[in-house]
Image: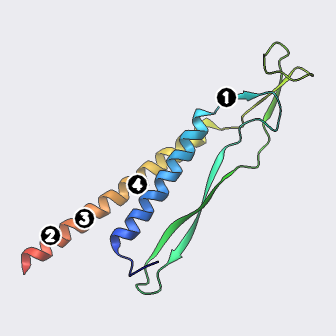
Amino acid sequence: MPGQMTLFDVAQRAMSAQLVRMNTAASNLANAGSVAGSEAEAYRPLRPVFAEQLDQATGLSTVRVDGVYRADVTPTKTHDPNHPLADENGDVWASPVDENSEMVEMMEASRQYRNVVDALSTAKQLMLETMRMK
């Protein structure tokens, strides 16, 4: 990481991480209930993975996105021979997305994002007050 990390760098990374959380939850919600003709083609939920990143110069710790991966969950098999995507056995495979947990994830990410915005606003106010004191 070039140069020393500042409060704004930490906040930017935190906000980016929350956006990744919201986007993966939105993608999962958009694909909830989708069906496919085989288990391999069925949508599997996305899961972001984060890691801590420590700036040795300042001692500030922040987050980085390590990746976004497909969850290792089995799609739900349903026998529906009249479905246009049904396989030769008459089965279709539904995505295993839990809509409730995805909504909770999205709300939590939104709240965390807002907390970082509030912290930045407070830091800005403190900086302005400090400048006025001089």
The three-letter amino acid code for the residue at tag 2 is Leu
The residue furthest top is 82
SS class, disc 3: helix
Tell me the CA gap for discs 4 and 3: 14 Å
The three-letter amino acid code for the residue at tag 3 is Thr
Which callout, 2 or 3, points at the residue further toward the start of the chain?
3
CB contact under 8 Å: marks 1 and 2:
no
Q: Residues within 10 Å of mark 1 (few under 14, many from 20)?
A: some
Q: From the viewer's perspective, is residue 67 above or below residue 4?
A: above
SS class, disc 4: helix
Tell me the CA gap for discs 2 and 3: 10 Å
In this rendering, the label closer to the viewer, 2 or 3: 2
Q: Residue at x 19, y 71 (%)?
A: 126
Q: Residues within 10 Å of mark 3 (few under 14, many from 20)?
A: few
Residue 32: percent from left, percent from top: 64, 32
SS class, disc 1: loop
Q: Is residue 118 left or right of residue 61?
A: left
Which callout, 1 or 2, points at the residue further toward the start of the chain?
1
The three-letter amino acid code for the residue at tag 1 is Gly
Q: Residue at x 46, y 81 (%)?
A: 55
Q: Which residue is mark 3?
A: 122
Residue 123: percent from left, percent from top: 25, 68
Picture quadrant of residue 42:
top right
CB contact under 8 Å: marks 3 and 1:
no
Q: Which mark is residue 60?
A: none
Which callout, 1 or 4, points at the residue further toward the start of the chain?
1
Which callout, 3 or 1, points at the residue further toward the start of the chain?
1
Tell me the CA gap for discs 3 and 1: 42 Å
The residue furthest front is 2
Q: Which residue is mark 2?
A: 128
Q: Which residue is mark 1?
A: 33
